[in-house]
Image: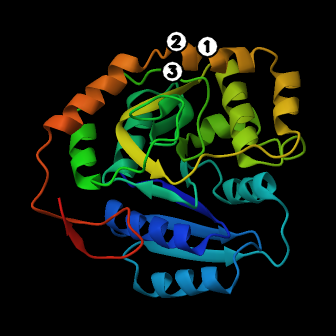
């Protein structure tokens, strides 16, 4: 089974993008299609990161840049429309994927046709944050060890209030039936994804945690100005549901299981520094 296309909207932080591309290169099988798309955001320093990476990457990479910015959600919707009905993985520009992340997400969708979105664990994943829920946890330093711990997780695919923007695999058929992103109402990908998730849920699909995948992130996603007010108006129960999920923490035992597996996993003798800004090996 071929892996889905990765969409990577380019941001303005060249250091974060450099780290993201380094982790993506190491954590993703060679030949996987990835599309870097710039909504007229990246300056010369961002270009200086992208150009040499494109020249040496093992991935099947393409790059595009708009002459004028149209906004985050509108730009991403253009990317999604260009992919047709295909399943697509959207990765934040500061994301730090752990080895195996994309295959596990693809397998998650393949196991259950009712799943519309699969979201991996993350240190900055709000409802799927690890090791503490709802917090901006430190970026994990031992990616290989964490990947081994994730591989041992039981596959429960618990339902989430919505998908989250650090990384998400979207089922193309569900996205198409729900009408895609509402770019007229929401400026941010953060809010547009919540809205899309809730519409897909209303049509009978599920938004779930991919138990055995992890994608780190240096910061959390943020809504645009006015986006949360629109969400609250359109989905009056959304805020209370999210707050209840975070307070009740139904993923507590699942999160603890990952913590135990991580503690038990033997570290390798040497490991590439996937989460650093420079290449090389460091002692485990």
Q: In this view, does 240 lie above or below 60?
A: above
Q: Is residue 284 above or below residue 280?
A: above
Separation of residues labelled 3 and 1 (CA atoms): 14 Å
- Among the two numbered marks 3 and 1 on one chain, the one whose residue lies closer to the N terminus: 3
Q: Residues within 10 Å of mark 2 (few under 14, many from 20)?
A: few
Q: Which of 53 and 249 is in front in this view?
A: 249
Separation of residues labelled 3 and 2 (CA atoms): 14 Å
Disc marking residue 159: 3
Image depth: mark 3 or mark 1 in front: 1
Identify which residue is drawn at 77% across, 51% down.
73
Q: What element carries label 2?
A: helix
Q: How crowded is mark 1: few (under 14 residues within 10 Å), some or many (20 or more)?
A: few
Q: Please identify the quarter of the rendering in which residue 165 is found.
A: top right
Image location (x, y in percent) of residue 132: 43, 30
Q: Is residue 53 above or below residue 3?
A: below
Identify which residue is drawn at 64% across, 46% down.
221
- Label 3 close to label 1 by CB (< 8 Å): no
Q: Residues within 10 Å of mark 3 (few under 14, many from 20)?
A: some
Q: Is mark 1 on a helix, strand or loop?
A: helix
Separation of residues labelled 2 and 1 (CA atoms): 6 Å
Q: What element carries label 3?
A: loop
Q: Is residue 180 visible?
A: no
Can you identify the residue that label 1 sits on? Answer: 244
Identify which residue is drawn at 51% across, 42% down.
124
Image location (x, y in percent) of residue 89: 53, 51
Identify which residue is drawn at 55% across, 47% down.
166
Q: Nearer the viewer, residue 264 or 117?
A: 264
Horizontally, residue 98 falls left or right of residue 205, namely: left
Can you identify the residue that label 2 sits on? Answer: 248
Image location (x, y in percent) of residue 52: 48, 87
Q: For the C terminus, give its image quadrant.
A: bottom left
């Amino acid at each position: 089974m071929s892996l889905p296309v990765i969409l990577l909207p380019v941001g303005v932080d060249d250091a974060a993008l450099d780290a993201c591309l380094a982790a993506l290169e190491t954590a993703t099988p060679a030949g996987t299609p990835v599309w870097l798309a710039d909504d007229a955001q990246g300056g010369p320093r961002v270009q200086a990161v992208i150009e040499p990476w494109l020249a040496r990457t093992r991935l099947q990479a393409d790059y595009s840049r708009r002459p004028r910015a149209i906004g985050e959600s509108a730009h991403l919707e253009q990317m999604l429309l260009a992919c047709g009905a295909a399943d697509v993985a959207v990765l934040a520009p500061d994301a730090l994927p752990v080895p195996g992340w994309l295959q596990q997400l693809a397998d998650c969708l393949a196991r259950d046709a009712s799943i519309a979105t699969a979201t991996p664990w993350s240190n900055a994943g709000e409802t799927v944050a690890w090791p503490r829920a709802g917090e901006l946890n430190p970026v994990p330093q031992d990616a290989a060890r964490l990947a081994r711990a994730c591989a041992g997780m039981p596959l429960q695919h618990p339902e989430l209030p919505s998908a989250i923007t650090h990384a998400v695999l979207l089922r193309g058929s569900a996205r198409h039936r729900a009408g895609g992103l509402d770019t007229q109402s929401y400026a941010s990908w953060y809010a547009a994804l919540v809205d899309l998730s809730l519409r897909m849920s209303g049509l009978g699909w599920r938004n779930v945690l991919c138990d055995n995948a992890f994608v780190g992130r240096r910061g959390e996603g943020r809504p645009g100005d006015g986006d949360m007010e629109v969400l609250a108006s359109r989905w009056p129960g959304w805020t209370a549901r999210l707050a209840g999920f975070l307070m009740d923490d139904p993923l507590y035992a699942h999160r603890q299981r990952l913590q135990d597996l991580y503690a038990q996993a033997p570290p390798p003798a040497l490991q590439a520094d996937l989460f650093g800004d420079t290449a090389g090996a460091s002692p485990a």
